[in-house]
Image (cartoon, helix red, strand yellow):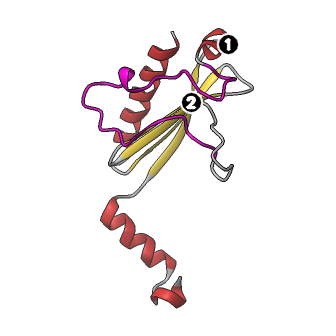
Amino acid sequence: MTARTGKDPGQLYAELTAKYGNPIYERIDAAAKAKSKKQAGQNSRRSKLPAEKHLPAGTASHAIGSPEAPGNHGVPIGGLKVTTENAGFAARPSGTEDVYKIYAESFLGKDHLKQIQTEAQALVNKAIT
């Protein structure tokens, strides 16, 4: 990168965060009964987790659907992915525990990340109960 741009990678990162915000990420586990996971389609290639009808009014979603495993050539992991301009989350059932894993990211800070996590957990709970 330095050879191509003449800038240190740290400088490039600082420019990106100045322009787009500093990303903050965290994974949480939300309790889910095995029966609920099965009803939500844990073992199917097409998750039965919520789609547009479960999203709160006004959710600016760019992508709703079954997230794919990175680097796994489009294989769905089962679950839901929602992205907005400044944040996003993916939720998927654990294959080994009675939990849903919620992966959330925000470019607007820790308080916004907590809000995204709370809303994601409520959305998943609504869909699996």
| Above/below status of 1 relative to 38 | below
Q: Which residues are magenta?
A: 41-69
| Above/below status of 105 relative to 96 | below
Residue 66 relative to residue 22: left or right: right
Query: Is 124 contained in the magenta span?
Result: no
The residue beneath circle 1 is 34
User: Residue drawn 36% across and 33% down?
Assistant: 115
Sort mark 2 into few (<14), some (14-19) or many (20+) by Cα contacts within 10 Å.
many
Q: Where is residue 40, by image quadrant?
A: top right
Query: Is 63 contained in the magenta span?
Result: yes
Sort mark 1 into few (<14), some (14-19) or many (20+) by Cα contacts within 10 Å.
some
Q: Which mark is residue 115?
A: none
How far apart are the alpha carbons under marks 1 and 2?
15 Å
Q: Position of residue 75 (x, y in %)?
A: 66, 42
Closest to the camera, between mark 1 and mark 2, is: 2
Tell me the element at label 1: helix
Q: Amino acid at mark 1?
A: Ala
The residue beneath circle 2 is 79
Q: Position of residue 72 (x, y in %)?
A: 69, 49
In the depicted view, which residue is nearer to us: 66 or 129?
Answer: 66
In the depicted view, which residue is nearer to us: 45 or 42?
Answer: 45
In the depicted view, which residue is nearer to us: 102 or 39?
Answer: 39
Tell me the element at label 2: loop
Q: Amino acid at mark 2?
A: Gly
| Above/below status of 14 relative to 23 | below
User: Residue drawn 39% across and 58% down?
Assistant: 22
User: Residue drawn 34% across and 48% down?
Assistant: 86
User: Residue drawn 60% across and 16% down?
Assistant: 32
Residue 25 relative to residue 61: left or right: right
In the depicted view, which residue is nearer to us: 65 or 36?
Answer: 65
| Lower sequence index among marks 1 and 2 | 1
Q: Position of residue 66 (x, y in %)?
A: 54, 34
